[in-house]
Amino acid sequence: METILGLLEGPFGALIMALSGIVFIVTMAIVFPIVAFRVAWWWGLLCFFFAGPATLIFTILHFQKAKIPFVATIISGLVAIGMFMMRSFINTFFVVTQ
């Protein structure tokens, strides 16, 4: 009988971790403008329409309010990138046959 931790090993686990990282990034992309709207309506609009530069400037100026979504976005991005780069994931789905 296979356990939950057994399912997270190998390429299937890498795929699950990568997809969960991507889902969390998208979630934080929704949460960030909500946090910005709580500060000022124009911050919310800027973070919604110009996500990259406005979010970075908002994070620098209002770090106490934006630290949780910012850190969560960075960590989930690193998880997603790291899992896509796992050798076992690449070897399983992009196998070159001879």
Image: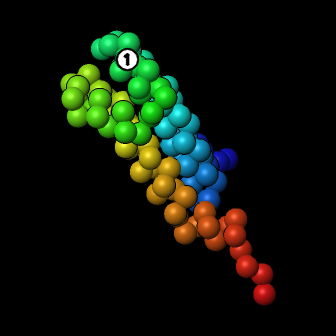
Q: Amino acid at mark 1?
A: Trp
Q: Work out which residue is located at the far right of the displayed protein and give it.
A: 98
Is residue 5 at all visible to an observer of this figure?
Answer: no
Say which residue label 1 marks: 42
Residue drawn at x 37%, y 39% as measured from the top left: 53
Of the 4 image quadrants, the one containing the C terminus is bottom right
**Element carrying mark 1:** helix
Q: Is residue 98 left or right of residue 61?
A: right
In the depicted structure, whether residue 19 falls above or below residue 51? below
Q: Give the percent coordinates (x, y) of residue 9.
A: 56, 56
26 or 94, nearer to the observer: 26
Which residue sits at x=46%, y=57%?
Answer: 82
State the residue in front, 84 or 11.
Answer: 84
Quick check: can you spot residue 88? yes
Residue 86 on image: x %, y %:
52, 64
Q: Quadrant of residue 4?
A: top right
Q: Give the image quarter of residue 50.
A: top left
The residue lying at 59 percent from left, 44 percent from top is 19
User: Pointer 1: residues within 10 angstroms few (<14), some, or many (20+)?
Assistant: few
> How far across and how far down the image is residue 70, in percent?
34, 35
Q: Residue 25: where, in percent of width, then height?
A: 49, 37
Tell me the residue at 44%/21% (across/down): 45
